[in-house]
Image: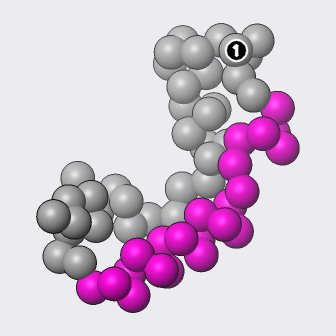
Amino acid sequence: MTAAWNIDVEPTTIANCFQHCKIRSEEDMPLKQEIGDVEGIHKLKEVISDLHYRNAMDVE
């Protein structure tokens, strides 16, 4: 599970998978510019990585 968070999956890829699997319809999907700030997400991943937590999803 942790390995899945370490690969670079674009938000549009996830949105396309949800649409393909009929989890969400095309009408329910946000516009491409609303999907996410990819650069901001990558910067956040770098900051979290610099904190050296063993498990970034459980920081307690």
Which residue is denoted by mark 1 in the rendering? Answer: 28
Q: In x, y percent, where is residue 25?
A: 65, 12
Which quadrant holds residue 22? top right
Residue 42 lies in the magenta stretch: yes
Q: Residue furthest front?
A: 60
Q: Is residue 50 found left or right of 29 in the rendered image?
A: left
Of residues 46 and 20, which is closer to you in this image?
A: 46
Q: Position of residue 39 (x, y in %)?
A: 70, 68
Q: Main secondary structure of the magenta part?
A: helix
Quarter of the figure with the C terminus = bottom left
Local SS, label 1: helix
Residue type, numbered disc 1: Asp
Q: Residue at 20% x, 60% y: name it.
A: 58
Whether residue 5 can be seen here: yes
What's the residue at 28%, 67% (across, down)? Answer: 56
Residue at position x 82%, y 32% from top?
31
Number of numbered discs on residues: 1
In this rendering, the answer to whether 40 lies above or below 14 is: below
Vertical relation: 27 (above or below) 57:
above
Q: Residue 18's spot in the image, x, y percent?
A: 54, 25
- Number of residues whose C-alpha sits closer than 10 Å to that of mark 1, classed few (under 14), some (14–19) or many (20 or more): few
Side of 27 where 60 appears, left or right: left
Query: In terms of depth relative to the viewer, which is nearer, 59 or 27?
Result: 59
Task: Please check the rendered image and state whether residue 41 is part of the magenta-colored stretch, yes or no.
Answer: yes
Which stretch is magenta?
Answer: 31-52
Report if residue 2 is visible in the image: no
